[in-house]
């Protein structure tokens, strides 16, 4: 079985469309989104519609929670807060309701999928120390789960736990899972890359070959930028798309 794992779309319609086009040529049976479908960019309603149309199995992220009224916006930075207030005004009630009903995490035979971390959806896994905490949480609360996909940082990353050691996995285009290892894997962000390279990032997980393949998809970011200006969203949101940060 081949899964596409995407995350952090953030209402960037051009990025989502390009990603779904790319996925359609990859012999993928199921698409999972690790949350933050909305927030930051100007097409929250359209992105929710597209996720539903493509039957993407979506989790709720922190921006989705704020947009749906599950949490407030006070813990977000000023740019995110500004964009969230815009999103709350623009988001149609039916979309808000859909977001509200999404799960916080999902579990398959092979893996767990979360937004930020297995112990809390808003926590970040940024380094081997955070990864250590995640691995011990997995071993105590999720028996038999050896793979956890996470998002929230908008950066591709992978960590392994083998022979009592947590390692950061250097992976340009992907890697193969080793027997007996535990893994934490982040596909990067569709709508707002923060790893220094513009374009949408996602991954494909093949449960038979145990391979993880990262893919980066170029899209018309000039169009997204134009829409940011027209919606009077913070300009920095447009500028950072070019830098991939
Ligand atoms: Zn996000």
Image: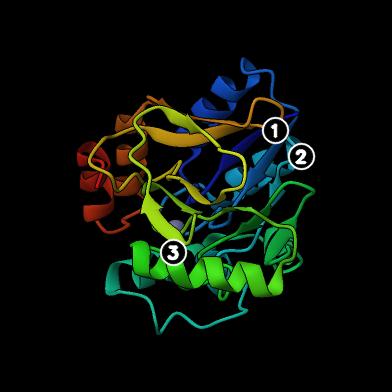
Q: How is the image coloured?
A: rainbow
The residue at which mark 1 appears reads as 207
| 214 or 60: nearer the viewer | 214
Name the image quarter holding the N terminus. Answer: top right
Query: Which residue is under mark 3?
Result: 131
Q: Which circle, 3 or 2, is nearer the viewer? A: 3
Task: Tell which of 135 and 187 is nearer to you.
Answer: 135
The mark nearer the N terminus, 2 or 1, is 2
Disc 2 element: loop
Instruction: Name the N-terminal-most of marks 3 and 2.
Output: 2
Q: Is residue 33 left or right of residue 11?
A: right
Mark seen at residue 55: 2
Residue that protrudes farthest toward the right in the picture: 109
Kindly report which numbered mark, 2 or 1, lies closer to the viewer in this rendering. 1
- Which residue of the protein is positioned furthest toward the top in this rendering? 25
Which residue occupies 44% across, 68% down?
132
- Asked whether the residues under the numbered discs 3 and 1 touch, taking CB atoms below 8 Å apart as contact, a structural biologist would say no
């Amino acid at each position: 079985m081949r899964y596409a794992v995407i995350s952090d779309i953030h209402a960037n319609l051009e990025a989502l469309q390009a990603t779904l086009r790319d996925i359609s040529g990859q012999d993928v049976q199921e698409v999972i989104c690790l949350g933050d479908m909305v927030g930051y960019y100007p097409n929250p309603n359209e992105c929710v519609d597209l996720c539903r149309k493509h039957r993407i199995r979506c989790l709720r992220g922190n921006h989705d929670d704020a947009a749906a009224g599950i949490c407030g916006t006070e813990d977000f930075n000023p740019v995110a807060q500004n964009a969230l207030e815009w999103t709350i005004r623009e988001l149609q009630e039916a979309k808000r309701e859909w977001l509200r009903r999404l799960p916080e995490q999902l579990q398959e035979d092979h893996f767990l999928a979360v937004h930020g971390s297995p112990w809390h959806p808003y926590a970040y896994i940024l380094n081997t120390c955070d990864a250590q905490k995640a691995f011990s949480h997995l071993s105590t609360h999720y028996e038999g789960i050896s793979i956890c996909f996470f998002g929230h940082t908008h950066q591709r990353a992978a960590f392994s736990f083998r022979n009592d050691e947590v390692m950061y996995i250097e992976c340009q285009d992907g890697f193969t899972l080793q027997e007996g290892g535990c893994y934490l894997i982040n596909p990067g962000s569709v709508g707002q890359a923060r790893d220094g390279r513009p374009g949408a990032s996602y991954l494909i997980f093949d449960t038979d070959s145990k391979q993880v393949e990262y893919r980066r998809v170029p899209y018309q970011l000039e169009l997204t930028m134009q829409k940011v200006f027209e919606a009077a969203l913070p300009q920095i949101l447009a500028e950072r798309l070019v830098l991939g940060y």
